[in-house]
Image: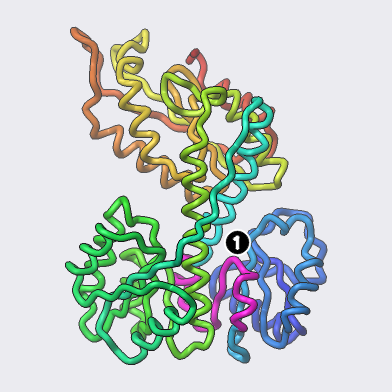
């Protein structure tokens, strides 16, 4: 169960926030309770709180919650102040469905993990005598693709975005929209599902299957049916907004800026791979660097999780088949980890993944790794009689670096470099 530290204007607002948290399956920690354990987030009930009071309240957050995400909650008595939106990692309305809240929180955690990863890698690079080159800030105008029937509300939203300097491109059909995605760069996609939503839903699924466009934020506009919203979220929509909300444009702009922020950091993580910190045989980071990186993340107070994957084959006592297939194995591992995760060579026949995105991220990587390895025909040396290569995994939650490394070493025995 996720635990949120609560900040509210008064007991009535705190009680309403607690009721909302119970419906979402969250535990609420009252503002006047001293917190020592790690919390998952800071929930601020915005009703009757001015921007100055929000800023002052955030200064009172306990140290255990400073690395957690901040969630702004409207209890229905006030609209979001557009000037306050950038202060929060995620926003929620009282009547938002749980699936939408989970999507927003998941995206917020990935952004927070990405920022932590940038800071930790910069520290770790220094320990190895090299420099981490920080992300470049994009200066070109923001761009958005609008896809859907040209309703008055949809057109009004696009025109308001243009007034903020966002370059808008419109598409009326899924085929036209995909052609535009292949030929141009976009920072966000806004979709109107309309009375016949199947074409839009298929387009969403196509975008999520397209590697080049996979991470672009998709925002559904004016979805009135809860079942349609559920399906859109399942297909890959990141958020849902309504054009009558005065804060909608500010929230769309925030989605664009967050995507640009995220993309620049992922690009920096992909480009910063100096030989001093790498295992050159596999293209993964070295085990020594992974240890230093774990230490840096733990010092930040981030919730760190480690996945170890060890490969072996039947009738291959010397590991020759696994050694021969190492380039294929490394290629699979690189494709399955995200930019904010650190892939390292854990042993002669093993790789590890360090992530601060939570246990769900580890489970996802583990399931995908085992599934792909089980159906892959690996290259083999001439005359080899070994059977199919398979993998076993170890998932750990790191609180202490030394004990974690001992567990990894013992589990991998007798594997050697």
Name the side, left or right, on which 248 lies relative to 85.
left
The N terminus lies in quadrant: bottom right
**Residue 59 lies in quadrant:** bottom right
Q: Give the number of marks.
A: 1
Q: Position of residue 210 (x, y in %)?
A: 27, 54
Q: Nearer the viewer, residue 367 or 194?
A: 194
Tell me which corner region of the image, top left, top right, bottom left or bottom right, holds residue 169: bottom left
Q: Position of residue 372 (x, y in %)?
A: 29, 37
Task: Say which of 99 and 288 sits in front.
Answer: 288
Q: Which residue is mark 1?
A: 2
Residue 173 versus residue 282 in the image, above or below: below
Side of 284 relative to 293 (left or right) = left
Q: Residue at x 67, y 31 (%)?
A: 126
**Residue at image location 28% in from the left, 76% down from the top:** 170
Q: In the rendered image, is residue 106 in sight?
A: no
Residue 92 among magenta residues: yes
Picture coordinates of residue 142, whole percent (x, y): 44, 67
Per the image, label 1 sits on a secondary structure element best described as: loop
Decide if residue 199 is in sight here: yes
Range of magenta residues: 81-103
Q: Is residue 223 magenta?
A: no
| CA neighbours of label 1 inside 10 A, class few (<14), some (14 to 19), many (20+) | few
Residue 362: image x %, image y %?
48, 44
Residue at x-position 42% and y-position 76%:
240
């Amino acid at each position: 169960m996720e635990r949120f530290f609560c900040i509210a204007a008064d007991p009535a607002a705190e009680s309403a926030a607690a009721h909302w948290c119970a419906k979402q399956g969250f535990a609420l920690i009252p503002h006047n309770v001293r917190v020592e354990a790690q919390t998952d987030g800071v929930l601020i009930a915005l009703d009757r709180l001015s921007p100055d009071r929000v800023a002052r309240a955030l200064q009172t957050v306990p140290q255990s919650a400073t690395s957690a995400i901040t969630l702004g909650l409207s209890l229905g008595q006030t609209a979001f102040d557009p000037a306050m939106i950038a202060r929060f990692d995620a926003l929620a309305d009282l009547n938002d469905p749980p699936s939408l809240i989970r999507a927003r929180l998941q995206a917020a955690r990935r952004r927070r993990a990405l920022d932590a990863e940038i800071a930790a890698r910069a520290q770790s690079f220094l320990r190895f005598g090299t420099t981490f080159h920080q992300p470049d800030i994009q200066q070109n105008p923001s761009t958005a693709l609008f896809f859907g029937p040209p309703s008055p509300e949809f057109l009004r939203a696009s025109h308001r975005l243009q007034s903020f300097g966002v370059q808008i491109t419109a598409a009326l059909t899924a085929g036209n929209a995909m052609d535009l995605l292949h030929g141009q760069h976009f920072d966000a996609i806004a979709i109107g599902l309309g009375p016949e939503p199947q074409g839009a839903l298929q387009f969403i699924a196509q975008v999520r299957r397209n590697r080049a466009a996979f991470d672009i934020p998709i925002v559904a506009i004016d979805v009135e049916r809860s079942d349609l919203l559920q399906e859109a979220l399942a297909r890959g929509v990141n958020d849902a907004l309504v054009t009558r909300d005065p804060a909608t444009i500010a929230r769309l702009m925030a989605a664009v800026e967050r995507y640009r922020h995220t993309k620049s950091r992922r690009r920096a993580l992909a480009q910063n791979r100096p030989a001093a910190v790498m295992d050159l045989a596999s293209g993964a980071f070295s085990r020594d660097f992974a240890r230093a990186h774990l230490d840096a993340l733990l010092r930040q107070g981030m919730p760190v999780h480690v996945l170890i994957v060890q490969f072996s084959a039947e009738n291959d006592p010397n590991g020759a088949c696994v050694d021969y297939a190492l380039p294929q194995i490394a290629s699979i591992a690189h494709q399955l980890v995200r930019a904010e995760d650190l892939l390292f060579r854990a042993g002669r026949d093993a790789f590890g993944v360090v992530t601060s995105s939570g246990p769900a991220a580890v489970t996802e990587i583990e399931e995908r790794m085992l599934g792909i390895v089980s159906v892959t025909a690996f290259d083999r040396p001439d005359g080899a009689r070994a059977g199919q290569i398979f993998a076993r995994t170890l998932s750990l939650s790191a609180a202490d670096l030394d004990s974690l490394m001992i567990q990894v070493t013992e589990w991998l025995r007798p594997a050697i470099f």
